[in-house]
Image (spheres, rainbow, N blue to C red):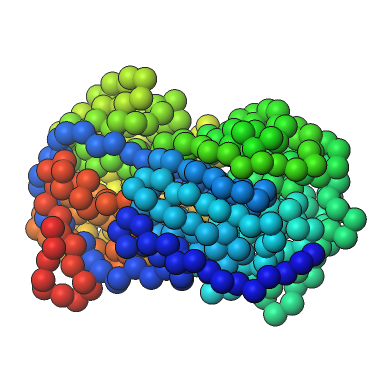
C-alpha cells in the first residue's frame, strides 16, 4: 500500500479548536454556589459516543463528508486529530464538520493521541477494512480499571486479521483481505461490536455478530454506514448481519442526540428541586433512567423530542443495576449517586459494567455524603444536606456528578481539573447558568472568575 508523508492541515473553527494538532484544554476549575433551583429549557447536541465513531467511519472511503449536530467537546477535537494524523482534514464550523479523506492513508494512530481516548481503538477495524493493515497504540481514556480489548481482537482474528504487539503498539495485518465470519461476543461490548462492524462492511461475504451491543449509537453508526453503501441488518438488536461490499462512498449525516447529556441536565433539575425541560433529545433512549427518576419522586413529562422533570422537595431512595442498553447506563451512575446522596433513605447501586468506576466516591464523601462500597455495590445513605468544599473531577461523568452535588450543597463547591468535563459536555457551565445555576469557571488555583 502506498504511503504518504503527512502534511496536516490546521483548520480552526468554533472555539478556536485546532483538530490538526494535539488538543490541550486549559486546566481549570468550576466554582458552584449551591441552593438555587434550576428552571428553564436546555437543548442537547449530538452524542459524543456517536460522533467519534462517525469520524472514524469517514476513513473508509476517499472523498468529502459532512457531519451535523456536532458538539464542541474535547474528545471530538481529539478524534479529529487522530484522523488527521491518518490523512484526513477536518474543518469545524458551528455544529458541523466537513472532512476530506484522501486516496492514500497513513494507517497508524500514535500513542500520544490514542492514550488520551479509548474510542480511538476503533480505527483498527476501519483501517484493516480500508488498507489491509493498521498500527494502533493500546488505548487510554478514563481510568475505570481493566477494560481489555480481547473481544475486539478475537472478532477481527476470526475475519482473517493477524496481530502482534510491539513496544505497546498493535500491528495488524489482513494479508489476504478480511472475510466474513460468525463472531459471538462474550459480552455485548459497544466497542467490539463497532470494530467488527467496521471490518465487516468491506469484508468478503457475510459477517454475523451475535450478542451484539444494542445501543442507539450503534444504530446511528449503522445508519451512517448504510448511507455510505454498507449493507447492514439488525442494528439495535442482539444479532447484526453485514454483507460485505467492495467499496463505500462519502455521505452526510446528522448525529443522534446525546442521551447522557440529556440525562445529566434532568438530574440537575431533580437534585435542585427544580423544573427543567431538555429539548432535541430522544426520550425513548432514556427509558430506564426516567423510570428511576420517577421512583425517586420526580414528576416527568415526555414529548416527541423533549423531556420535562420537576424535582421533589427531597428525593426518595431507589435501587438499580447498571446494564447494557436498554438497561440503566453506567455513564449515568455517578450523577444518580449524587442525587441519591440527599435522599430520605438508603439506596444500593450495582455496577455491572466497569468494576473500578468508583474514584468519585471519596470526593462526594468530602461534601458530606455517606457513600460506601461493597464489591461492585455502592451503598448510599441519604443525608439531610451536603456542604461545599474543594473536590477533584477525575473523569467526565464523575466531574459532572460533583458539579450536580455542588448545586445542592451549602456554600461553594470548587471542582478542580474540570477540563475533564469538557471531554463530554459542550458549554456545561454556561447551560447550567442559563438554567439559573450560580457557577463560574476559573483557572485552577486562581481567584479570578469568568462567567
Q: How many numbered badges does the structure rendering display?
A: 0
Taking the spot 28% from the left edge, 24% from the top edge, the residue there is 300
Taking the spot 62% from the left edge, 33% from the top edge, the residue there is 227
Query: In the displayed structure, does residue 184 sit left or right of residue 359?
Result: right
Query: In the displayed structure, does residue 377 sit left or right of residue 120?
Result: left
Query: In the displayed structure, does residue 262 sit left or right of residue 415?
Result: right
Above-or-below relation of 294 to 35? above
Image location of residue 98, percent across then percent down = 48, 49
Quadrant for the C terminus, please.
Answer: bottom left
Quadrant for the N terminus, please.
Answer: bottom right
Residue 387 visible, this orientation: no
Taking the spot 64% from the left edge, 74% from the top edge, the residue there is 5
Residues 196 and 266: in front is 196
- Looking at the image, which residue sits at the far right? 176
Taking the spot 79% from the left edge, 38% from the top edge, the residue there is 244
Image location of residue 317, percent across then percent down = 31, 37
Image location of residue 344, percent across then percent down = 23, 38
Residue 251 visible, this orientation: yes
Residues 136 and 432: in front is 136
Residues 103 and 275: in front is 103
Task: Residue 292: name its quadrant.
Answer: top left
Image location of residue 435, percent across then percent down = 16, 41
Task: Residue 2: name its quadrant.
Answer: bottom right
Above-or-below relation of 72 to 309? below
Amino acid at each position: 500500500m502506498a504511503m504518504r508523508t503527512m502534511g496536516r492541515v490546521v483548520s480552526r473553527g468554533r472555539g478556536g479548536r485546532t483538530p490538526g494538532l494535539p488538543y490541550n484544554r486549559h486546566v481549570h476549575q468550576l466554582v458552584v454556589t449551591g441552593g438555587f433551583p434550576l428552571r428553564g429549557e436546555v437543548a442537547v447536541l449530538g452524542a459524543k459516543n456517536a460522533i467519534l465513531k462517525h469520524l472514524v467511519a469517514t476513513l473508509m472511503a476517499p472523498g468529502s463528508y459532512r457531519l451535523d449536530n456536532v458538539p464542541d467537546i474535547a474528545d471530538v477535537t481529539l478524534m479529529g486529530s487522530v484522523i488527521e494524523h491518518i490523512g484526513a482534514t477536518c474543518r469545524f464550523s458551528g455544529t458541523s464538520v466537513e472532512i476530506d479523506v484522501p486516496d492514500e492513508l497513513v494507517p497508524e494512530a500514535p500513542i500520544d493521541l490514542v492514550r488520551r481516548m479509548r474510542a480511538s481503538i476503533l480505527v483498527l477495524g476501519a483501517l484493516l477494512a480500508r488498507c489491509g493493515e493498521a498500527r494502533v497504540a493500546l488505548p487510554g481514556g478514563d481510568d475505570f480499571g481493566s477494560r481489555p480489548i480481547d473481544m475486539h481482537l478475537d472478532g477481527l482474528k476470526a475475519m482473517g486479521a493477524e496481530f502482534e504487539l510491539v513496544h505497546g503498539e498493535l500491528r495488524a495485518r489482513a494479508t489476504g483481505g478480511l472475510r466474513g465470519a460468525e463472531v459471538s461476543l462474550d459480552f455485548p461490548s459497544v466497542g467490539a461490536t463497532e470494530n467488527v462492524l467496521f471490518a465487516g462492511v468491506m469484508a468478503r461475504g457475510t459477517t454475523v455478530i451475535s450478542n451484539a451491543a444494542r445501543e442507539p449509537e450503534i444504530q446511528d453508526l449503522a445508519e451512517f454506514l448504510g448511507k455510505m453503501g454498507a449493507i447492514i441488518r439488525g442494528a439495535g438488536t442482539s444479532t447484526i448481519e453485514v454483507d460485505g461490499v467492495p467499496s463505500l462512498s462519502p455521505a452526510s449525516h446528522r448525529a443522534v442526540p446525546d442521551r447522557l447529556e440529556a440525562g445529566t441536565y434532568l438530574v440537575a433539575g431533580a437534585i435542585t428541586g427544580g423544573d427543567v425541560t431538555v429539548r432535541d433529545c430522544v426520550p425513548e433512549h432514556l427509558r430506564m433512567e426516567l423510570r428511576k427518576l420517577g421512583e425517586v419522586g420526580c414528576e416527568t413529562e415526555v414529548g416527541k423530542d423533549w423531556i420535562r422533570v420537576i424535582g421533589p422537595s427531597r428525593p426518595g431512595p431507589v435501587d438499580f443495576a447498571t446494564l447494557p442498553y436498554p438497561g440503566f447506563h453506567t455513564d449515568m451512575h455517578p450523577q444518580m449517586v449524587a442525587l441519591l446522596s440527599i435522599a430520605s433513605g438508603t439506596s444500593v447501586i450495582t455496577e455491572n459494567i466497569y468494576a473500578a468506576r468508583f474514584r468519585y466516591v471519596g470526593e462526594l464523601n468530602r461534601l458530606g455524603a455517606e457513600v460506601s462500597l461493597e464489591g461492585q455495590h455502592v451503598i448510599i445513605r441519604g443525608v439531610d444536606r451536603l456542604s461545599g468544599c474543594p473536590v477533584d473531577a477525575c473523569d467526565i461523568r464523575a466531574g459532572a456528578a460533583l458539579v450536580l452535588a455542588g448545586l445542592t450543597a451549602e456554600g461553594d463547591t470548587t471542582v478542580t481539573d474540570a477540563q475533564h468535563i469538557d471531554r463530554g459536555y459542550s458549554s456545561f457551565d454556561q447551560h447550567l447558568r442559563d438554567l439559573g445555576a450560580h457557577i463560574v469557571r476559573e483557572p485552577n488555583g486562581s481567584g479570578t472568575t469568568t462567567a
